[in-house]
Amino acid sequence: MTFNDLGLSEKVLDAVQQAGFEKPTPIQEQAIPVALQGRDVLGIAQTGTGKTGAFVLPMLTQLEKGRARARMPRTLIIEPTRELAAQVADAFTSLGQNHKLTMALLIGGVSFEDQDRKLGRGVDVLIATPGRLLDHFERGKLLMNGVEILVIDEADRMLDMGFIPDVERICKLLPPRRQTLFFSATMPSEIQRLVNSFLKDPVRIEVARPSSTAANVRQALVKASSEAKAKRETLRGLIRGAVELKNAIVFCNRKRDVAVVHRSLARHGFNAGALHGDMDQHARMATLDSFRNGEITLLVASDVAARGLDIPEVSHIFNFDVPTHAEDYVHRIGRTGRAGRSGTAWTLVTPAESKYVRAIQSLIGNDLPWEGAGGELAEEAPRGGRGRGRAKDAPHSKGRDRGGKAAPAKEDRRDSAPQTRKAQLKEPEAAAATDMSGDIRPEIAAASEFERPAPRAQSRHPKQRGNEKSGADTVFGESEYVPAFLLRPTRASSK
Ligand code: AMP
C-alpha cells in the first residue's frame, strides 16, 4: 500500500514526499483511512511506529475545509509531556508545510502571554499538556466548544503521570459531537475505562503487541557487581566493546546516578551528556540537540527525562540499572531499532536486580539471554534465560573461560570487552566540559530516590497543579506533576 491509497489530500501527499516517507507504516496504513471517514480511532501503538503521522496526516486533510475562530481551536491534541507536545508541533510544521494553518503550543516553560496572543488570533491546531490547557481555560482564555477533532496521545503515560482526572475533565468540556483519536502503547483497565467513556464506537487498531520489544533489537543481560565502581567499569567495558556503536543512551533508575555515571564516563574520556528531570527545558533541549546532531555520543538519562523523545537512529541502549517497572524496559528498548533499523540493548544486572528481570521477562513474554553460556549465574539469574548463549554482538567476555567457567567478576569486567573500540571518544578534558552534574540539586536528588512520577491511577490533588503553572521555574520539567513527597524538605545524603 502507498500513501496515495489512503485518501489524503494532494497537499498532504506532497508534504509526505518532501518528508521522505516512502510508504505508510502499519499504524498509518490502518488509522488514516478510518480517521478520514470521521470515525473514532483507538490506536494501540508505541512511539517509533509512526503514530504521530497516523493522526497528523488525516487531520491536515480534514482541516483544509473551514477556518479558525478567535479562542476556539478547531482541533486539540493532548500530550503528557512538553517534549512530546513540541515534537508533535514539529510534525505539524513539517507535514503541514503546504497548509496555511495556525497552531499554538500550550506547554509549561513558555510565557502565558505569547500563548494567549496566539489563541486570541484563532488556531486550527492546539497542542497542549493537560495542566496548561486547563489553566488557560480557567482564565477564560479558551473556548473548547469549537473542537472538531480531539487527539489523546500516549494515554498510558498520562495515567503514569496522574493526568487522567485532567484528561477526563477536558473531555467533558468538549462538544460530544467530535471525533476522537486515542493512542496508547498499553491498555491497562483505567485506560480502557477512559476509552469506554469518551470514544464512540472506535475502530481498534493494534500494530504491535503491547509490551513487546522490537524483534530487530538484540537484547542481552550482563552480570554486574552491586559495587557501584565495578558496575561502572562493566558499563565502560560494554561501551568499548560495542560493535558499530553510533550513539547510545545509558539509562539509570535514579537521577543521582545519572549525574554520577555521566561524570564518570566523561572522566574516562567518553563523549557523554546527561538528561535528567531537574534540568530546565532549555538545557534539556540543548543536550538533546547535541545528541541528535552527533556532538554527544552517549546520553545518560533517567526514564522520565527520556520519555517520549524522538531520537532517531540510536544504535545502542545500555541499562545501567534494570528498570524497576517492567514497562520502562519496553520504553527504553523502544529508543533503538526504530523504523526497522537494527539495535542492541544491554542490561546490567546485579544480584539484587534479578527480580526485576523476572518481571520484564514475564511482561515481554520472552527470556532475555545472558551474556555468555553456562550456569554460573544460576543463583542470580531469574527463571529461564540462563545459558541461552550470547547475543549476536555480545562482547567476548574474559570474565569466563570458554567452558563457561566464571572468573573473578570485578577486575575482569574492565577487560570484558574487546578493545576494538568503535565509540567516538573525545579527549578527557574536552569531555569533562560537558559535565552538567552541577545542575542537580543534592537535596532533591537525595529526596527522589526514583524519578518515576505518580503511581498508576493516582489522582492529582488540585493544589499540585501549581507546579505546572510555574512555567520555566518548574523543577521537574518533563513530568509536570510532582508527587507531594518529593516536595518535602529533606537533608542531602552524606554519601
Ligand atoms: P513516531 O512513532 O510518530 O514517534 O515516529 C517515529 C519516527 O518515524 C519519526 O522520526 C517519524 O518522522 C518517522 N516516520 C513516521 N512515519 C514514517 C514513514 N511513513 N516512513 C518513514 N519514517 C516515518
Image: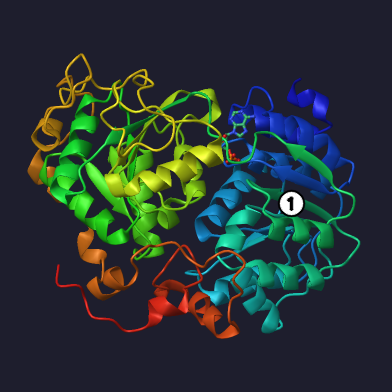
Residue at the spot 82% in from the left edge and 24% down from the top edge: 5
- Extreme residue toward the front, this view: 379
Q: Residue 15: where, in percent of width, then height?
A: 67, 34
Q: Is residue 435 left or right of residue 123?
A: left
Residue at the spot 21% in from the left edge and 14% down from the top edge: 403
Choose between 3 and 211: the one closer to the eye.
211
Q: Is residue 206 left or right of residue 135?
A: right
Q: Residue 370: where, in percent of width, then height?
A: 34, 28
Q: Quadrant where the C terminus lies?
A: bottom left
Q: Which element type, helix, strand or loop, lies under badge 1?
A: strand
Q: Amino acid at mark 1?
A: Phe
Q: Is residue 82 left or right of residue 197?
A: left
Q: Residue 49: where, in percent of width, then height?
A: 61, 35
Residue at the spot 84% in from the left edge and 66% down from the top edge: 146
Q: Which of the 4 image quadrants contains residue 313?
A: top left
- Structural crowding at the residue carrying mark 1, measured as other residues with C-alpha within 10 Å and reported as few (<14), some (14–19) or many (≥20): many
Q: Is residue 277 left or right of residue 233?
A: right
Q: Which of the 4 image quadrants contains residue 1?
A: top right
In the image, is residue 143 above or below residue 238?
below
In the image, is residue 356 above or below residue 107?
above
Choose between 60 and 311: the one closer to the eye.
311
Residue 78 is at least partly visible in this image: yes
Q: Which of the 4 image quadrants contains residue 387?
A: top left
Residue 424 is at least partly visible in this image: no
Q: What residue sits right under mark 1 in the picture? A: 182
Colour option used:
rainbow
Q: Residue 20: where, in percent of width, then height?
A: 59, 26
